[in-house]
Each structure stands twice: as C-alpha cells, then as structure tokens.
C-alpha cells in the first residue's frame, strides 16, 4: 500500500514538473517575436506600458513582458453604414460613405481610446447628419465634396488624440425618397427637352441665315457679272467706234491725197458722173416719179457745177 502511494506521488510530481516545464518552454517561445513590416507591437511589463516594437526580430523578458496590442500602420478603409438624414427643407435622405484612415501613433491608438474604428464611424455619421441638416436637398447633391471635406476636418481633429490620421471621407450614396426622385427625374427630362428644342431652333435660325447669305452672295455675283459684261460691251463698242473713225479718217486722207495728186480731179469727176447716171437709172424705173435732169449733152458743165459745189 505504501509502495503504491509512493508511485502515485511520483507520477503526480512528474506531471506537475512536466507541466511547469511546458509552461516555461511556451513562455520562452513567446518571448521571441518577429514583427512584420508596417506593424507595431505594444509591450506591457507587469501590466504597464513598457515599449513599442518596430518591424524586425525582438526578444522579450519571459514571465514579465507580454504583447498587449498589435497595431497595423497601413491605410485602412471602413464603411460607414447607411443612415437617414434630414435636409434643411425637411426632406429625408439616406447617406452612406467610406473612411480612409491610418495609425501614426500606436501608443495613443492602444491607450487613447477603446476602439478608434467604431469611434470614427460614429463621429462620421453624426457629423454628416449635422452638415446635411444645414443644406437644402439640391445643394446636398452639388456640394458632396464640400460635405466630405468638412467631415474629414472634424474627424481628423478628434482622431489626432487617438493617434490616427483621417485621410479621406467619401460619400458613396445619397438617396432621396422615391417621390422626390421621380419629381427630380421629371425635372431633368423637362430640362433635357427644353435644351433640345432650344438647340433645334438655334440650328434652324442658323440654317436660314446661311441660306439668305448664300442667296445674297449669289445675287451680288450675278449683278457683278452683269456689270462687268456691260463694261466689257461698252469698252468693245468704244474700241469699235474708234477703229471705224480711225479707218474713216485714214480713207478720207487717202481720198484727199488722191484728189490732190495728178489726175485726181478727173477721176473724181468720172466717179461722180457714174454715180449720177446710176442714180438716174434707178429713179427712172419708178413710174410715179418725174425726173428733171440737167443738160446731159453738156456733161462738162454739170461736172464743173458739181466741182464748184464740192
């Protein structure tokens, strides 16, 4: 009986020592930490903040040091759940968004607030409600960037105490009630039709202007052509008259020179006599006319008389 009790005590002792050994081994293993890039570990010693581990290999003091918080230094995105807001003109809209933030101080992010993510979402919702409450419905659609900027300013001021930097806040959806949305669609359709009618009238007006300008230029070209035609005809006639006059003058000068020359006077008399006789022969064929001729037997006297007349 005593031997069995002794063996039992030995087994229990071995189990206890094995457990203690495993615990010590586990603590020694946990004291070795490899911190990834863009991460920081917050180490507490005996329940108080001790240090912040940067990226790399670190060895902690067993049984006294422990990693209390792990902070990710990369940029985070968090959805802001949809919420109902009332505009200044008492119209309810549904708004949601997304926050972009980054931890810059791991100590403040661990001890400055319980959960900075939850706090940022709540503050973003309350700030969005208060800003939209100061705007009319139409302005909420037009000033989405201004709303986002104001939310970022308020969030960043508060999050600075938490060791967090608010980078951006974007409104994803801003949905008005169905009745308001239908009236807005009708308004947009009416505006689109008005612009189409205006553009059509402007196009027709421009078409009429272009047509009238074309006709005006056509008439101007026709009149200019007629004008140039008359000028050319007048110039041609003037040239013709000048040529005829020049030819007549030259013929007269030639005749005068012939008359002055030897035998010229007799040639003129002969030509006039022939013309006189030819004229009398034409007139004699008309029975209704009476011809009183000169003394045909004495042609010399008649030619002298004609010469005197000349």
Image: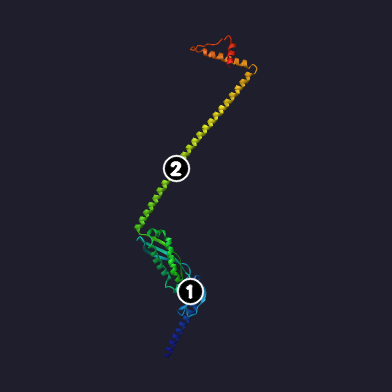
Label 1: which secondary element: strand
Label 2: which secondary element: helix
Label 1 to label 2, Cα distance in Å?
A: 79 Å
Mark 2, Cα crowd under 10 Å, few <14 / some 14-19 / many 20+, is few
- Quadrant for the C terminus in the image: top right
- Quadrant for the N terminus in the image: bottom left
Residue 41: mark:
1
Q: Residue at x 43, y 87 (%)?
A: 9
The image shows residue 60 at horizontal and vertical percentages of 50, 78
Q: Residue at x 62, y 16 (%)?
A: 265
Mark 1 or 2, closer to the camera: 2
List the single residue furthest toward the front: 308
The image quarter in which residue 300 lies: top right
Residue at mark 2: 209
Who is closer to the viewer here, 56 or 73? 73
The image quarter in which residue 240 lies: top right
Q: Residue at x 53, y 30 (%)?
A: 234
List the single residue furthest toward the top: 297
Q: Residue at x 55, y 29 (%)?
A: 238
The image shows residue 25 at horizontal and vertical percentages of 48, 80
Q: How is the image coloured?
A: rainbow
Mark 1, Cα crowd under 10 Å, few <14 / some 14-19 / many 20+, is many
The image shows residue 225 at horizontal and vertical percentages of 51, 35
């Amino acid at each position: 009986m005593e031997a069995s009790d002794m063996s039992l005590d030995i087994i229990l002792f071995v189990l206890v020592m094995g457990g203690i050994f495993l615990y010590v081994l586990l603590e020694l293993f946990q004291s070795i930490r490899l911190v990834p890039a863009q991460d920081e570990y917050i180490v507490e010693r005996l329940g108080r903040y001790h240090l912040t581990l940067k990226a790399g290999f670190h060895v902690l003091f067993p049984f006294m040091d422990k990693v209390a918080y792990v902070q990710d230094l990369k940029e985070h995105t968090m959805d802001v759940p949809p919420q109902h807001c009332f505009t200044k003109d008492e119209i309810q809209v549904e708004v949601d968004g997304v926050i972009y933030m980054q931890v810059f101080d791991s100590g403040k992010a661990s001890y400055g607030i319980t959960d900075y993510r939850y706090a940022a979402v709540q503050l973003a919702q309350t700030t969005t409600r208060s800003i939209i409450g100061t705007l009319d419905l139409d302005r909420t659609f037009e000033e989405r960037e201004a709303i986002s900027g104001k939310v970022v300013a308020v969030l960043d001021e508060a999050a600075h105490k938490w060791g967090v930097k608010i980078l951006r806040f974007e409104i994803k959806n801003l949905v008005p009630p169905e009745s308001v949305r239908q009236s807005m669609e009708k308004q947009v359709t009416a505006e689109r039709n008005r612009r189409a009618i205006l553009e059509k009238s402007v196009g027709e007006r421009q078409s009429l202007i272009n047509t009238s300008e074309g006709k005006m230029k056509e008439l101007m070209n026709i009149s200019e052509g007629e004008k140039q035609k008359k000028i050319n005809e007048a110039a041609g006639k003037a040239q013709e008259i000048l040529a005829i006059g020049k030819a007549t003058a030259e013929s007269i000068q030639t005749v005068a020179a012939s008359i002055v020359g030897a035998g010229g006077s007799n040639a003129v008399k002969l030509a006039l006599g022939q013309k006189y006789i030819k004229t009398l022969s034409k007139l004699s064929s008309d029975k209704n006319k009476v011809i009183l001729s000169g003394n045909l037997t004495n042609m010399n006297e008649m030619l002298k008389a004609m010469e005197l007349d000349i």
